[in-house]
Image (tube, helix red, strand yellow):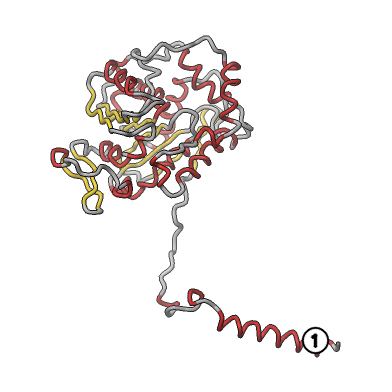
Amino acid sequence: MHFSRLASHATRGVWRAGFAALFMAPASLMAQENPAGIVLQSGFDHIGAEVHSLEIGGRKIHYIDEGETDWRPVVFIGGLGTSLAAFQLTEFARTSREALGLRMISVERNGFGESEFDPDRGYAGYTEDVLAVLEDLGVDEFAIVAISGGGAFAAHIAAEVPDRVLSLHAAAAVSWTLPTRDEIDCTMSLEEWNEANEQWTHNPKSWWGVPGSPVLVIPGWQTAAYADATRAFYLGGQLGDPSALSREFTQRCDENAVVDPSQITAPVFLYWGDEDTSVPMSVMEQWQDALPEIRQARVYEGAGHTVQYEFWVQILADIAGYDDHTVVCIDGDTRLVPSADAGDLPRDLCAWH
């Protein structure tokens, strides 16, 4: 066929296809209004906390810092074997956190995520890292919130700088560094712990999977949890090396692992589920025995080891200084009401109910 005729046929084919597509297009693809009236964003939407780094003595410390500089600073410490990204699992309530004026700072622990592993660093080393970040940020006084395995580190920080800690909030948190703790098995070496923990670090989904938990109703929560496990065990080139996780167990047997509880003078808040089988109610009692001046001990009926997420907004309210109020759901609106008026109203975010 002659080239011009071929081009002519092709042009007519394109025109016909385009014409047909115009009349066959679904309504959703048709312009609904004058585009000049559509207001598009000028800035970026939030898709996750920015990771910052600070170099001290040739070693990099990685951290996140979310919130305005004039808000109340809060050191967030995630559970056993988690990276700094574990904080993201609480951001389903970001709107409430910002309304309460809370600035969250999370410092990555030894060997997880992008942090190099040093087998000699323990609780004191992490305390040094946190205080170094706070100094760099110009933060003097701060609150602490610790989840599960993070409780061991929180006790050390609170005891090291008692005059700077506004409050300590422990949610289903281990008592490994308190004198009231259960007896610790110190017979296993780091290598033996590695053999036991390899099943978790080589299969991150098994570490962060929470089948049947109420938190699975939060859109994207489980996916974000798997991402944290991947960051913790692989991002820095660990290739599933369990050493960092194992060190979180062996440092319980280090000299000076147990703190002097008399040095923890900040108000302490405890949050527990009465059906928690990972860190049972008996551990909450160990906190109470070690630190008799507990400001609040909130126990939630029917909750398990994800109690911190199910009642996260209450924890935020307590951190912000509204511990005499209870977060409740009233006619579809989440509200803070005086605790004496809370009665049997559904607790925490209305989304749960």
The spot of residue 262 in percent (x, y) is 28, 15
Q: How many numbered marks, from 0 up?
A: 1
124 or 59: nearer the viewer: 124
Q: Is residue 45 above or below residue 335?
A: below
Residue, disc 1:
6
Left or right side of 343 for 86 = right
Q: Is residue 288 above or below residue 141?
A: above
Q: Quadrant of the N terminus?
A: bottom right
Disc 1 residue type (three-letter): Leu
178 or 219: nearer the viewer: 219
The spot of residue 345 in percent (x, y) is 20, 44
Which residue, as the protein is rendered here, is positioned at the far right?
1
Left or right side of 124 for 299 = left
Quadrant of res 327: top left
Residue drawn 49% across and 36% down?
209
Is disc 1 surrounded by few (<14), some (14 to 19) or many (20+) residues within 10 Å?
Answer: few
278 or 59: nearer the viewer: 278
The spot of residue 183 in percent (x, y) is 41, 11
The spot of residue 40 in percent (x, y) is 43, 68
Residue drawn 40% across and 22% down?
152
Task: Give SS at disc 1.
Answer: helix
Residue drawn 49% across and 22% down?
248
Which residue, as the protein is rendered here, is positioned at the far left?
340
